[in-house]
């Protein structure tokens, strides 16, 4: 999402309205691939406060993720704010940590939007609040089926036999 700053740079105390649609790049975060197959919307403003440009956006869209318990693909609504101070490269500033430098008359907002997304993303998504997940023993999705893993009392003799069999095949 490339924004043309030509007018707002000249317009001290002015305001530039932003209303754009754009494609979010696929993001991998904490082992989850966020796939965005539909356009996102960014609505907000850039205000020229005479020293810097203040960017404020509301970004919204949909993402395809996976349930943290059962792995089912789910569609989730994404909505997060973006607040950044944009300062032209070469401007004297007291604290460069909190600003984003731009050069020229345009700014590419994709990376800024993605980093703000990552600051707001929940650690995990669930397909539903009470998702039962997968049986750790047989792998069945416990939301759809029930298994009998809990009901079978473990048989020490069977386990011993399995161990012996395993050892035998291992040494072969
Ligand atoms: Zn689930
Ligand atoms: Zn099971």
Image (cartoon, rainbow, N blue to C red):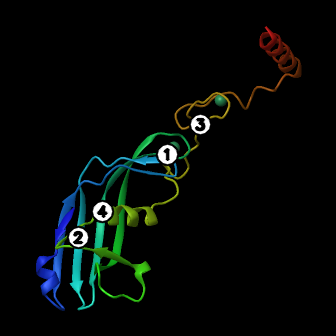
**Mark 4, secondary structure of its residue:** strand
Which mark, residue 154?
none
Total residue callouts: 4
- Which percent across, then down, holds residue 159? 83, 20
Residue at label 1?
67
> Ligand 1 within 8 A of label 1's CB?
yes
Q: Using the image, determine if residue 145 lies above or below residue 84.
A: above
- CA separation in Å, label 3 and label 4: 31 Å
| Badge number at residue 134 | 3
Query: Looking at the image, which residue is at 29% across and 61% down?
Result: 110
Pointer 4 residue: 60
Judged by depth in the image, the label closer to the viewer, 2 or 3, is 2
Q: Which residue is mark 2?
A: 43
Q: CA–CA distance between discs 2 and 3?
A: 40 Å
Q: Earlier in the sequence, mark 1 or mark 3?
A: 1
Residue shown at 68% from the left, 30% from the top: 137
């Amino acid at each position: 999402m490339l924004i043309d700053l030509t007018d707002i740079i000249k317009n001290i105390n002015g305001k530039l309205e932003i209303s754009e649609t754009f494609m979010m790049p696929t993001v991998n975060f904490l082992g989850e691939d966020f796939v965005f197959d539909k356009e996102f919307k960014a609505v907000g403003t850039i205000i020229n406060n005479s020293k810097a440009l203040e960017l404020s956006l509301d970004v919204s869209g949909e993402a395809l993720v996976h349930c943290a318990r059962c792995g089912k693909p789910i569609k989730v609504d994404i909505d997060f704010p973006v607040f950044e101070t944009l300062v032209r490269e070469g401007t004297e500033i007291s604290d460069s940590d909190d600003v984003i430098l731009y050069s020229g008359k345009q700014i590419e907002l994709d990376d800024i939007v993605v980093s703000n997304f990552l600051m707001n993303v929940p650690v995990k998504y669930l397909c539903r609040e009470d998702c039962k997940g997968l049986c750790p023993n047989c792998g069945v999705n416990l939301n759809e089926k029930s298994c009998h893993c809990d009901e079978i009392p473990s048989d020490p003799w069977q386990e011993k036999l399995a161990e012996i069999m395993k050892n035998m095949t291992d040494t072969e």
